[in-house]
Amino acid sequence: MVLDNYDLEQIADDLYKDRRIIGSVYCGNCGYNLRTLPYVYTCPECGSKYNARPLVMQGIFAPYEIEFPFRDIMVTLICGLGTLAFAAKTINAFSVQWLVLTVLFIVLTASLILHAHSRLARYFKAVEISRRVAEQEREADA
């Protein structure tokens, strides 16, 4: 019998199934402190699934990942300017090549806008969770 990655992950999850989280670990969706809960479970506050097993950490808040998405926004703006330049060239000297390039850049810009929007939303959510976690830690210390 050969075990693949999925089988190994299931075995590891089963090993941690009855173990409890000792330290403060926070839900990646709402910031709830998951201490004393099982390593693989759902958050009692928001119901999102998490896996706090070492080397997995899915659905867990990681404060070091909070970074404003400057690069995504800049790439989107540069691509948008390129789209405007191609559109201006297409309007001035209509040709099929410029039209195709303009359409491709419009599609690329639209996808980059969606990506930057989702990264920005994740950033603001992480900042909110970070504030909530800091507040919970202050209350615990008091």
Image (cartoon, grey):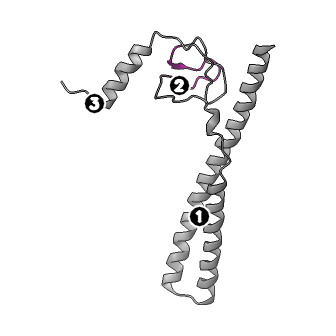
Looking at the picture, does residue 97 appear above or below residue 81? below
| Circles 3 and 2: CB atoms closer than 8 Å | no
Query: Can you say which quadrant of the picture contains the C terminus?
Result: top right
Mark in the foreground, 1 or 2: 2
- Residue labelled with disc 3: 4
Mark in the foreground, 1 or 3: 3
Name which residue lies at 44% across and 15% down: 16
30 relative to 48 in the view: left or right:
right
How far apart are the two marked residues, 1 and 2, measured between alpha carbons? 33 Å
- Residue labelled with disc 1: 109
How far apart are the two marked residues, 1 and 3, measured between alpha carbons? 39 Å
Residue type marked 2: Tyr
Q: Is 12 contained in the magenta span?
A: no
Considering the numbered disc 1 on the image, is that residue within a helix, a strand or a loop?
A: helix
Considering the numbered disc 3 on the image, is that residue within a helix, a strand or a loop?
A: loop
- Residue labelled with disc 2: 50
Considering the numbered disc 2 on the image, is that residue within a helix, a strand or a loop?
A: strand
| Precedes in sequence: disc 3 or disc 2 | 3
Residue type marked 3: Asp
Q: Position of residue 19 (x, y in %)?
A: 48, 10
Q: Position of residue 60 (x, y in %)?
A: 57, 28
Query: Can you say which quadrant of the picture contains the N terminus?
Result: top left
Magenta stretch in the rendered image: 38-52
Residue type marked 1: Thr
Q: Position of residue 67 (x, y in %)?
A: 66, 44
Q: Which mark, residue 99?
A: none
